[in-house]
Amino acid sequence: MSGSLQFFTPSRAPYLTLQKLPATSNTRFPVINFPAKKQTLTITKLSSSDLDAASSQVLDSGNGQSGAAGVLSAESVVAVPSHAPSDSGAAAGIDVDSVTEAELKENGFRSTRRTKLICTIGPATCGFEQLEALAVGGMNVARINMCHGTREWHKMVIERVRRLNEEKGFAVAIMMDTEGSEIHMGDLGGAASAKAEDGEIWTFSVRAFGTPLPERTINVNYDGFAEDVKVGDELLVDGGMVRFEVIEKIGPDVKCRCTDPGLLLPRANLTFWRDGSLVRERNAMLPTISSKDWLDIDFGIAEGVDFIAISFVKSAEVINHLKSYIAARSRGSDIAVIAKIESIDSLKNLEEIILASDGAMVARGDLGAQIPLEQVPSAQQRIVQVCRQLNKPVIVASQLLDSMIEYPTPTRAEVADVSEAVRQRADALMLSGESAMGQYPDKALAVLRSVSVRIEKWWREQKRHEPMVLPDVGTSFADSISEEICISAAKMANNLEVDAIFVYTKTGHMASLLSRCRPDCPIFAFTTTTSVRRRLNLQWGLIPFRLGFSDDMESNLNKTFSLLKARGMIKSGDLVIAVSDMLQSIQVMNVP
Ligand SMILES: Nc1ncnc2c1ncn2[C@@H]1O[C@H](COP(=O)(O)OP(=O)(O)OP(=O)(O)O)[C@@H](O)[C@H]1O
Ligand SMILES: CC(=O)C(=O)O
Ligand SMILES: [K+]
Ligand SMILES: [Mg+2]
């Protein structure tokens, strides 16, 4: 197989085309044919006002919505019923998320947010209006955590999100997060939280209690708990948010004195430490996917969730196992498997786990309970980097805006933490308690959004293009051609300052390869199926559209231009680069 890079003069607009030649050609590597005639490219420069629109205000802590960078007023998001909820009648129209559409129109191409946002849904956000407010506020993915709530409750949330998508034109994807079999507390007998004060004696027990729980009593889910702990051990709740010292064991009850006071949340994770090291004992033998997790996974497959995030992954084996299970159970649907990196073992086997997965999550909550806190930032940096190199989306999660559970403004330190994750160019940021049970879910989302837009813009202006070497991830020569096309297209897009890259992709793979290059302009990803479109919602810089298209790029482009122009999303003269995975080509043109 071979490819050739051809420049030729099209009748309509300037083109640069890289095409795969038929297999009859006998050269192994692409040959560059220089054009007989020199091409002149008309480059449409962005006016600085496009960028200024987004930079007027970074953080609006008084009111989460108005004035913040890249923020939309609720009125600017027009409720657009989805044009064709089923994949079939797609040929006529184009589906794009109504929030992104409004954002594009208000702020211009360049100022759209590239970092994706995930919200954990809980009691504070499970209502239809509350979910809608999050969708309007920029939520790309809704996460449900199977540690909490019943399957009926989760089913209700999924149905509401799907209904929002259909009725209001959003494209919010669903991520189901498994419970895993690590040790955690019970549900506090229904209380939202409990305060542990310095010096108080609490009982941690494997006994089953009725409700309400006896005072200062915590139920523990792990039968071996009382046997495994020793007097003198340190018991950490949520990786050290609250600390206790074990002072006495009485049968199934373990008496502990609070040494670091704090708020206990339902089902919080528990770890115990002896002589400064994490005690892993039998806990390390627990399966990654418990029998309850398998039932939850069956539930997720039946409900057609877009992502399944697996807690406490230890090796690639479990990911491979789950992926083949999903493939056998859900014919044709593509549920992506996200590996949560939150244990010592997952860090040891990081590369193989990420290679096996469809993405990863830096689950800093539990990770910080397993490794010293001061090692979490470097672990985060490494995970983000490995994911980028292996072309897998990566989520930075936990405590990004923890104080916003109780307060309407973030701390300076939290803003710095969010900025760092954006600067590392993670694909997505995730809210946990802030959106699940906090008092200010919409404001927390608004902070993520405005900090993301601000830092992304700063990065582009400073031209801080990190000299990251992106290794070849493909396994075939055709894969290598796709990668080279995407790397070249992204480079050209930056150098020519194009307004957008268009990618026509059936599986989404070319779109993810472009996203990996983190170009300066947004990437419009056109795909034929709703599920691929929702899945692309997790990836940096991608604006996923659903569009029926053919193998004829000329007609695809004409169709896209007229549909997007009709919706006011592009205009004549905009400079775009188009690539596709049917015909491996790069085209540069002005919108006619
Ligand atoms: N479905 C729910 N019902 C009730 N409370 C919830 C629900 N989902 C989340 N919460 C609350 O929000 C808090 C944070 O939620 P989240 O699911 O992100 O926990 P986490 O500890 O970060 O995740 P994990 O359990 O996967 O480590 C929980 O401790 C819980 O109090
Ligand atoms: C998100 C999660 O599971 C954690 O941070 O532990
Ligand atoms: K979980
Ligand atoms: Mg966790």
Image (cartoon, grey):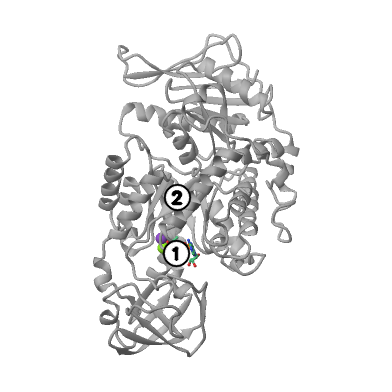
**Front label number (1 vs 2):** 2
User: Counting other residues with Cα less than 10 Å from the Cα at mark 2, is it few (<14), some (14-19), or many (20 or more)?
Assistant: many
Q: Residue at x 40, y 73 (%)?
A: 186
Quarter of the picture containing the N terminus is top left
- Which numbered disc, 1 or 2, marks the residue that appears first in the sequence? 2
Placement of 221 over or under 529, stated as above or below: below
Placement of 349 over or under 44, stated as above or below: below
Q: Residue 559's image quarter?
A: top right
Do the numbered discs 1 and 2 sit on residues whose CB atoms are within 8 Å?
A: no
Q: Position of residue 574 (x, y in %)?
A: 66, 25
Placement of 403 over or under 30, stated as above or below: below
Q: Is mark 1 within 8 Å of ligand 2?
A: no
Q: Is any atom of residue 590 visible in this view?
A: no
Q: Amino acid at mark 1?
A: Val
Front residue of this view, candidates 119 and 353: 119
Q: Amino acid at mark 2?
A: Met
**Residue pointed to by mark 1:** 376
Front residue of this view, candidates 118 and 57: 118
Q: How many marks?
A: 2
Q: Position of residue 54 (x, y in %)?
A: 71, 45
Left-right relation of 156 to 338: right
User: Counting other residues with Cα less than 10 Å from the Cα at mark 1, is it few (<14), some (14-19), or many (20 or more)?
Assistant: some
Front residue of this view, candidates 462 and 44: 44
Helix, strand or loop at label 2? It is: strand
Q: Position of residue 439 (x, y in %)?
A: 62, 65
Front residue of this view, candidates 135 and 562: 135
Q: Residue at x 47, y 29 (%)?
A: 87
**Residue pointed to by mark 2:** 175
The answer for how far apart the CA atoms under marks 1 and 2 are is 24 Å
Helix, strand or loop at label 1? It is: helix
Which numbered marker is on residue 166? none
